[in-house]
Image (spheres, rainbow, N blue to C red):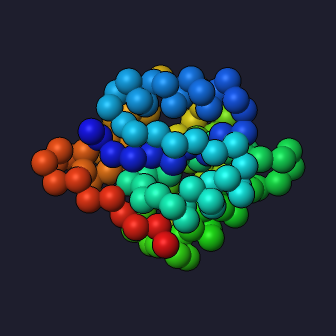
Amino acid sequence: MHGKILLLDSKPPVRGATARHLTAAGFTVLTARTDAQARSLLDTHLFDAVLIDHPFGRPGLDEGLRFARDLRMQDPRVPLLLMTALPLEEVRDSAWASGITKLLPKPQLMPVLILHLSALIPAAANEDLPHPVPMR
């Protein structure tokens, strides 16, 4: 197993396809369509990384970045990967200020995304020692 991922994406087809690819690559993936669903999952599960689509949630709102800021205040260690279709220059400063660990443009080839996630998750580097990062 490569680690447990929380995937936040408000678009069902994208969320489903991404989850299937990551699962096929050996990750355990739980998905959330809304901020509230993601927070509920954090109450009951430990995750090795969080993958956030941007913009996430309702149009015009930075729910994904707000979620990242709130999560970062609770746990500074969990890797947060933000993927965006917006120009990176527009998102970079607010992403870093929100505590995002890695920022990637969309679309992203799935093998590249898997490599980035694997590099962010300590357990992926040493399959014998899985250590999920507590979120709460």
Q: Nearer the viewer, residue 66 or 93?
A: 66
Q: Nearer the viewer, residue 133 or 82?
A: 133
Please identify the residue farthest to the left as the structure is shown. Answer: 128
From the viewer's perspective, is 59 left or right of 110?
right
Q: Quadrant of residue 27?
A: top left
Tell me where residue 78 appears, x and y as whole percent.
42, 62
Q: Quadrant of residue 54?
A: top right
Q: Is residue 108 visible?
A: no
Residue visible at 38% across and 24% down in the picture? 24
Is 110 drawn above or below residue 121 in the view shown? Answer: above
Number of numbered labels in the structure image = 0
Q: Is residue 91 visible?
A: yes
Tell me where residue 86 appears, x and y as whole percent.
70, 39
Residue visible at 25% across and 45% down in the picture? 124
Please identify the residue farthest to the bottom as the structure is shown. Answer: 73
Please identify the residue farthest to the front as the structure is shown. Answer: 44
Tell me where residue 111 appears, x and y as whole percent.
38, 24
Position of the N terminus, as image quadrant, is top left
Residue visible at 49% across and 25% down in the picture? 20
Residue visible at 72% across and 39% down in the picture? 10
Tell me where residue 127 appears, x and y as whole percent.
17, 44
Is 109 drawn above or below residue 95 in the view shown? Answer: above
From the viewer's perspective, is 127 left or right of 17?
left
